[in-house]
Structures are given as C-alpha cells and as structure tokens.
Amino acid sequence: MALLHDATIVPSKLELIEAWLPSQPWAEALPALERVGGFRLDDPDGEVGMEGILLRSADGAVTVHVPLTYRGAPLEGAEDALVGTMEHEVLGTRWVYDAAADPVFVAELTRTITEAGTEAEEYFEVDGAKVTRAPSVTVAGSGGEPGELVVVHVVGAAVPTGPTLTGRWDGGEGVLAYLAG
C-alpha cells in the first residue's frame, strides 16, 4: 500500500520532469505534454517511493511514461539517473531518480510483471483512518518468466512479445514495460 501525503512539493514532479525530458534521447521532438495520471508500486521495505507518471499531448496522439523513484538519500552510483531533488513538506528532501536505473524499482516492476500483479493501493491517513484513493492509472502484469526489464517511455511504439505490464487510463491503454528474453 502506498501512503500518500497531502503536502506541498517544490519543485513539483511535473516541473522536474519538464526540466529533465530534453536530456533524454527517447524524448526528442516531443510535443507539449500534460499529466494524465499515475500509478504506484510498493517497496517491500517501505523506503523508496515508486511512481509511474503518464503524460499526454493535447491531441492525445502521444503518451509518455516516466517512472520515478523518490528516496530520502542519494542512491550511490546512480548520479546519471538523478532527475533532481525536491523539498517535500512532510518527508523533507527527496532525491528523484529515473526509476529504470533504481534496483528497487526494477525488482518490484519485474515481480509485478512475472507474478501478474497490479498497482499498489493508494491511501491517505485522515484523523487516524485510512482513506483510499482510486488510481488514475491501473496496471496489470501478464505473468511470465523473468528477463531484462525494458521501460517503454513513448507508449504505443512497437508492442513486444512476452511478459508485459499494461496500463489503462482515461482515454487510453498501452504497454508500459516488458521483460526481454
């Protein structure tokens, strides 16, 4: 389960993504994008926040998947995957990484795919009670044998064969990751 906080975050996730995208080779010539939604995965140890964020062009022709991890300290050896840092009103400084380079995300997404898993339940704590929130993006793993994880950034490109993670959101669906044999 993913505990969410009603908190101010500076810079926002979208601001971090917008600043980072131009440096990504797969993001060349992308149109202006707006947030569609996202899904969460659980870190079994409860230390790393994991979120897949979907962005879409105004005409709906292009959908982009940006998975991020949020950490309370720098991830050693992952300097090239650092998207940036943000100040979280509740959690303090968070180091934000391209999740494809984060071993916790890779392990959890691989498990989700191979075990035919789904996104984490999202909730807030309000006056000591758990209040769940419906995800804006649902995901489902197909099941299958482990392999090398490949994150699909521009959704709708060639659809792979083999074990996949498929996402569904308002106005679309597509493969967000797959395991290469």
Image: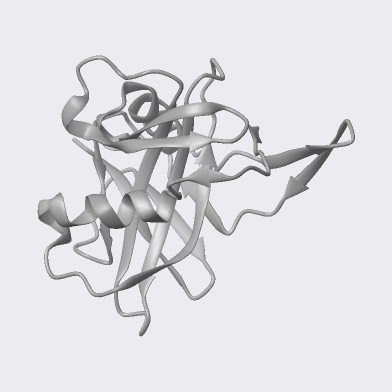
Q: Colour scheme of this structure image?
A: one colour
Q: Is residue 98 visible?
A: no
Answer with the quarter of the image where residue 156 lies. Answer: bottom left
Q: Depth check: give the residue in front, 74 or 39.
A: 74
Task: Quarter of the image for the N terminus: give it.
Answer: top right
Q: Position of residue 108 (x, y in %)?
A: 43, 28
Q: Is residue 130 visible?
A: yes
Position above or below: 40 against 93: below
Residue at coordinates 19% horizontally, 25% vertically from top-left?
79
Q: Depth check: give the residue in front, 170 or 166.
A: 170
Q: Depth check: give the residue in front, 94 or 68.
A: 94
Q: Position of residue 92 (x, y in %)?
A: 53, 27
Q: Position of residue 120 (x, y in %)?
A: 59, 38
In this image, 47 relative to 65: left or right? right
Position above or below: 146 against 160: above
Residue at coordinates 38% horizontally, 64% vertically from top-left?
55
Residue farthest to the bottom, as pictured: 59
